[in-house]
Image (cartoon, rainbow, N blue to C red):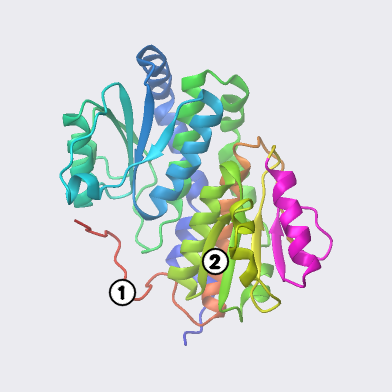
Amino acid sequence: MIERDPAATRMYREAGEAADAVRAQLGRNAGLMRDLGVSLRGMAPRAVVTCARGSSDHAATYGKYLIETRLGLLTASAAPSVASVYHAPQDLRDCLFIAISQSGASPDLLAAVEAARRDGARVLALVNEEGSALARAADECVPLCAGPEESVAATKSYIASLAALAHLVAAWVGDAPLLDALRYLPMHLETAWHLPWESGAEALREASHLFVIARGVGLGIAQEAALKCKETCGLHAESFSAAEVRHGPQALLRPDFPALVLAQDDEAREGVEAVARELVARGVQVVGAGIDVPGATRLPTLPAHPVLQPVLLAQAFYRLANALAVARGLDPDNPPHLHKVTRTL
């Protein structure tokens, strides 16, 4: 057991730097994103394939919902082992292949990118390490501008990936309101970081299991929250869509098995709130953000463009995860058996 100040961890410091990272990214990539938007409209890809692992793959889930809802383009997640283990060719002609990585060094990700180019895809890399092998292997590279990230748990690089995907889609579709909202995202991230989500740590401190429930563009944030609970808090957590959780998994939820419920103010909110109300009625402890459900522990949120609300939820959640890890006597900077770069083959 470790006793320490939650504000003394690297995870806390780095997560708190996300606003500056996004501010730098938006400034640096403004021209690049404009050009990519024009180029992608001209290309008119027949499909989009995302490729990532861990937190970056959760960012890709956010990107999938953005691309499919804003552009109507089929977007699927690649299985890197198709290229790195099975060496199976795929027909990726006229497809956009988006690889997302903090380090740009994972061998299976690189193998998938190289195979995608051979199979005819246009490869776009969203990567923090601009001198990485992934950045060199891609046709175009979007720098995440998150700066050094020493804590094993990715935080600001994940937020930077979400911002880059929102910027890319806004430029691609020519969404003026979203582009305008992105200008204020760094300021809103600063505010979100200081929301008192630590109150949720007390509610979850003794939990052994947790479901994180969201839907739509917020699902990737639920995936990320579940991962962080596992790797930094020693808390077994799984993420589910508010629709999918009804297909069996909710049978596990009971008073000693809580749920963290996240919602953004769009078409998906009604369904998320309906699930939260049902759980509260059954005596399940519900900790919620973005929902108005009597009986749930409510975490504060900020008004923002619905596409960007999940980014703010992720930022606030990192404060909760860091506090929860410390409250459980763990070191969030050094999760057991984990390393900063995972070199899967």
Closer to the camera, 228 or 18?
228
The residue under the point 43% across, 34% down is: 75
Q: Is residue 336 magenta?
A: no
Query: Pointer 2: what residue?
Result: 321
How far separated are the C-alphas under marks 1 and 2? Answer: 19 Å
Closer to the camera, 231 or 157?
231
The residue under the point 57% across, 21% down is: 175
Q: Residue furthest right?
A: 294
- Crowdedness near tag 2: few (<14), some (14–19) or many (≥20) residues, C-alpha within 10 Å: many
Q: From what the image shows, is residue 206 above or below residue 334?
A: below
Q: Which mark is residue 337?
A: 1
Position of residue 147 measured from the top left corner of the image (x, y, whole percent): 36, 48
* Side of 206 where 326 appears, left or right: left
Q: Is residue 280 magenta?
A: yes
Q: Amino acid at mark 1?
A: His
Q: Amino acid at mark 2?
A: Ala
Residue 297 in sight: no
Q: Residue furthest top?
A: 42
First in sequence: mark 1 or mark 2? 2
**Which region of the structure is painted magenta?**
268-297
The residue under the point 45% across, 57% down is: 14
The residue under the point 59% across, 20% down is: 176
* Side of 298 where 159 appears, left or right: left
* Side of 32 where 299 appears, left or right: right
